[in-house]
Every structure is written in structure tokens, then in C-alpha cells.
Amino acid sequence: MSDTTAAGTGPLTVLSAGAAALARADTLDQALGVIVEAGAAAVGAPMAAVFLQDGDDGALELLLTLGMADDTVEPFASDVSSNPDHPIHHAALDRTGTLSRTGETPDGTTLTGADLPLVVASGGVEACVGVLTFGWPGAHEVGTGEETLLVAIADLAAAAIAAFRSSSLAAERAEWAERVSHTDPLTGLSNARTLGRVLELEVARAARQQTEVSVAVFDIDGFTRLNDEAGARAGDRALREVAAVLAETVRLVDTVARTGADEFVLVAPGSAGVLVAKRVLDGIAKLGSVEGHAVTVSAGVARFPQDGTDGTSLIEAARAALGASSGTAQVSEASA
């Protein structure tokens, strides 16, 4: 192929397509598809493929192909990923690439390939994130201008991968931060902040609909003694085991949170709080001992509107009921 390209398929078209893909594509597949298609047209390559490299073990995974017959895609991907001597594999490892590589297709025809590593830099450290390969039937010599264009196309593809990976990482971090802000790190249950919001909403809804809301406060019996005699690890284990029973026993409409060192609070829409609390205690009774200490829990239950008209008063009423039975592994009701 000559160094000149047809109108509408030259460097400016590639640049325009790449810029649009980076600015507006919804997914990495979509962005790379636009870049690779425009690049293949610019260099007159009827075939192309993109492999992504896993950062942990260096494995190559075929992401997309262009102009390849369906029955050749899987063997091609398998050959590249399983054969460390494959030129595409070498391009990822060496980060040097190969231009005008000549080989044969399974049907015996000659094919010329160009394998370009997709390299990005972060903090002054370069890393290969994949390989972009183009293919021409027969013999094909890559000229100087075409080589420059191929490198530019590879850089656009690498930039797209880096951008979408950064966006994905940022989204994951935001999701993690949001989850952490609403959960107790030791037990995985909701935290006091989340409980407060849920309780406020449930009380407001019950007031509008003239229904009930139950609040149950659970406390691990003898938790301080367990910590003192068996250590913090034993205490943490007891907390996790109690939390697991709570999570497995409550209903889908219920919310359970850890609100103190050994305190858990259940918000249960309706009047079933006592029933749910008893099921929790039954489940905890089946737990084994922790460092020779039996794990038992007591509970106090309050109901809206009988025992309180807001979240604070309901929790106070439930704690008062709990105080009347603390250490006895039973459920006490505030209005009983």
C-alpha cells in the first residue's frame, strides 16, 4: 500500500473518530470498535483484532475482531493466548511490535500482519494493556507514513482502554466508599447512620398509613466478660456469628444494624417485631460456644405508635425493655 490514503479514510478521519470515541462512547467495546474500524479503513486492512492484557498474570483476552470469519475467531484467540511464541504474544511482552509480519492462514493463503502493543504510562511507569493487530491478504509492505498512522491508531486505542479502566476504577471506588459509609466493617450489617435514615422513613410511612413499626434492640449477654477473659478476637467472632444469624433470620422488608459495641437494632415494618426477635434468639441458641463461652442474646422490643412517636423514643423504649431482661436470653416488650 502507498503512503497516501483515500479521501475520508486518512489520518484526519482516524483522529476525528478517535476523539469522538473517547469523548462520547458508552463502553470500551464501542470506543475501540470505532477506532479500529476507522484505523483499518485508513490503512486498507480488511482484518483487525484487539487483545486486552490482564495486569495480574499477563494473559491476553480477545476483545473484538474486524473482518474475520466466525469459524476462525475462536482458534485464533486460543492460539494467541496459549502460545507464548506467537508474535502477538511477543508484542505484549516486549512492547516493541512487529510490522509486515508474513504468515499463512489455516487455508494456506498468505497473510501480512502488523502487531502493535498498546502502551500507557502512569506515574512515569509504562505498562502494556493489550495488542492491536491488523491483517492484509497477501504480501504487504508498510510504508513510513502508514507506520506513523498505525502507531497513532494504537495510541488512540491505548488511551481509550486507559480512560475506561480509570473510569471503571473510579466507579468501583465510589461504590465501595458508598457501601462503607452505610455498613459496619466488622459484621457487614448496616451501621447506625443507615439505621437512622431507615427508621425515620418507616416511622413517617407508618404515620401516614396508620400502621405499626417494630424496633428491637439486641444485646449479647456477658459480652464484656467474654472480651476480658477470651480476648478481642473471641469477641469479634461472637459479633460476626450473631450478625450472621440476624441477617439470615430477618425478613426482606426488615433492616438490621450494628449500633454499638455489642448492640444490634432491628427495624421491622408492622407488628411482627416480637416474632422476628424470638426467631433471632432461637437461631442464636443453636450457635456453638466461643472460647468456652456460650453465646446468648437478649432483646427489647418497642412499637410505633404505642411506645414512641419517633425513632429516638422508640429505640429508648426498646433499650429500656432490654434493660429489664438483660442477661436472661429472652425478649421483653416495652408495652407489656
Image (tube, grey):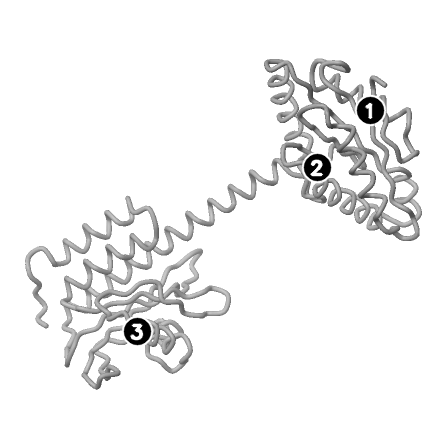
The amino acid at mark 2 is: Val
Q: How far across and how far down the image is residue 82, in percent?
A: 42, 78
Residue 335's label in the rendered image is none
Q: How far across and how far down the image is residue 54, in percent?
A: 45, 65
Residue 319's label in the rendered image is 1
Which quadrant of the view contains residue 13?
bottom left
The amino acid at mark 3 is: Gly
Mark 3 vs mark 1: give the one in front. Answer: 1
Mark 1 vs mark 2: give the one in front. Answer: 2
| C-alpha span from label 2 to label 3 | 58 Å
The amino acid at mark 1 is: Arg
Residue at x-position 63% and y-position 36% = 252
CB under 8 Å between discs 1 and 2: no
Classify the position of the N terminus by image quarter: bottom left
Label 2 sits on residue: 250
Residue at x-position 70% and y-position 19% = 311
**Which structural element holds mark 3?**
loop
Q: Is residue 7 above or below residue 273?
A: below
Pick the front one: 263 or 122: 263
| C-alpha span from label 1 to label 2 | 19 Å
**Which structural element holds mark 1?**
helix
Label 3 sits on residue: 97
Badge 1: residue crowd in 10 Å (few <14, some 14–19, many ≥20): many
